[in-house]
Image (spheres, rainbow, N blue to C red):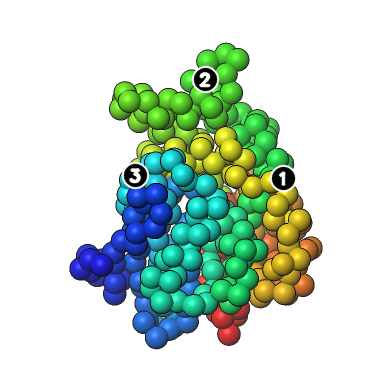
């Protein structure tokens, strides 16, 4: 355990998990508050100060951690033994290390995927789910995001993304191969372009300077791990979450979904909600970003409602 380097968090440090990984974590809020686990997106994006805006620090006791290979966790950007199954078991190790038996899970985008898969495996440890931008990690979602679906709405962004890919090459494989290059210049270039692609349509608000946004989070680990997970279909069978939804159908669940989410289309949220008995679907006038104003308001309100 390390000294607290973050003035807002009351504890920081690293949790040793398997395969040589050390996961960076912070505990934020009230040590006696309602326990919440925050799962960041990407995979690989890590968490940041902006993610604390959803939590009343007098009411909640929040665990933030960077998943394998993400941001401040070590080793940085590693894809070795980095699968959805590893991340699920890592959650248990983080909870056990910090002495949390049961938590509310708050996650968006890839964080919603991981939250759902974890809940399917370990429903006993989940008090409730607060999910945003549902990503079911199925063929539909993968093909929409990286198989050309985006070009129907953002042809200019798609053209910029694929112009680096050699003719006849699979874009995901080609990007990942170059991001893992020993040539740092090549690696950085492809990681930047991958992240630039996503940031170009993640919010309903106009981004005046995408380059500045990319400086606010660990875009290189996001790019590497996103490509790694997408290449491997997120390491879960087709429609795994929907086909196993009966295992979590009675867990209190709130879904906040942007009507104009181009990364995780709303149909996925509707599909999920239809399988759950104890859920509420909130459709808001937003894009994918948790920072879009209506999404932010809904997440704060739904967390309070769910956690009672």
> Front-most of 237 and 209?
237
Point 40% across, 33% down: residue:
192
Q: Which residue is mark 3?
A: 76
Point 61% across, 29% down: residue:
155
Residue most extreme to the front: 19
Q: What is the number of the mark on residue 142?
A: none
Point 42% across, 66% down: residue:
94
Q: Position of residue 296 (x, y in %)?
A: 52, 65
Within-10-Å neighbours for mark 3: few <14, some 14–19, many 20+:
some
The reply to whether residue 4 is visible in this rendering is: yes
SS for dot 1: loop
Residue 155 is left or right of residue 89, and the answer is right
Q: What is the number of the mark on residue 165?
A: 2
SS for dot 2: loop
Looking at the image, how many numbered discs can be counted on the residues?
3
- Please tell me whether residue 229 is drawn above or below residue 60 in the rendered image: above
Q: What is the number of the mark on residue 238?
A: 1
* First in residue order: circle 2 vs circle 3: 3
* First in residue order: circle 3 vs circle 1: 3
């Amino acid at each position: 355990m390390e000294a607290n380097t973050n003035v807002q968090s009351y504890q920081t440090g690293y949790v040793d998990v398997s395969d040589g990984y050390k996961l960076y974590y912070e505990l934020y809020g009230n040590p006696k508050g309602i326990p919440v686990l925050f799962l960041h997106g990407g995979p690989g994006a890590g968490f940041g100060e902006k993610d604390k805006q959803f939590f009343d620090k007098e009411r909640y006791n929040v665990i933030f951690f960077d998943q394998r290979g993400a941001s401040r966790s070590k080793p940085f950007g590693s894809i070795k033994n980095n699968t959805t199954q590893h991340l699920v078991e890592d959650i248990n190790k983080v909870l056990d290390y910090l002495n949390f038996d049961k938590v509310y899970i708050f996650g968006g985008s890839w964080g919603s995927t991981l939250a759902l898969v974890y809940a399917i495996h370990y429903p006993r440890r989940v008090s409730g789910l607060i999910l945003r931008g549902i990503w079911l990690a199925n063929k539909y979602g993968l093909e929409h995001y990286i198989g050309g679906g985006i070009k129907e709405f953002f042809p200019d962004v798609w053209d910029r993304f694929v112009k680096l890919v050699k003719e006849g090459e699979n874009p995901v494989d080609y990007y990942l191969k170059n991001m893992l290059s020993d040539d740092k210049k090549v690696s950085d270039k492809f990681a930047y372009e991958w992240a630039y692609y996503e940031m170009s349509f993640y919010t309903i608000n106009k981004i005046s300077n995408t380059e500045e946004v990319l400086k606010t989070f660990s875009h290189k680990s996001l790019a590497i791990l996103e490509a790694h997970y997408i290449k491997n279909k997120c390491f879960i069978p087709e429609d795994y979450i929907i086909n196993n939804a009966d295992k979590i159908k009675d867990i209190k669940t709130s879904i906040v979904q942007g009507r104009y989410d181009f990364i995780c289309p709303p149909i996925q949220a509707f599909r999920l909600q239809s399988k759950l008995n104890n859920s509420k679907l909130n459709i808001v006038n937003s894009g994918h970003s948790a920072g879009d104003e209506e999404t932010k308001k809904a997440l704060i309100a739904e967390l309070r409602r769910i956690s009672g």
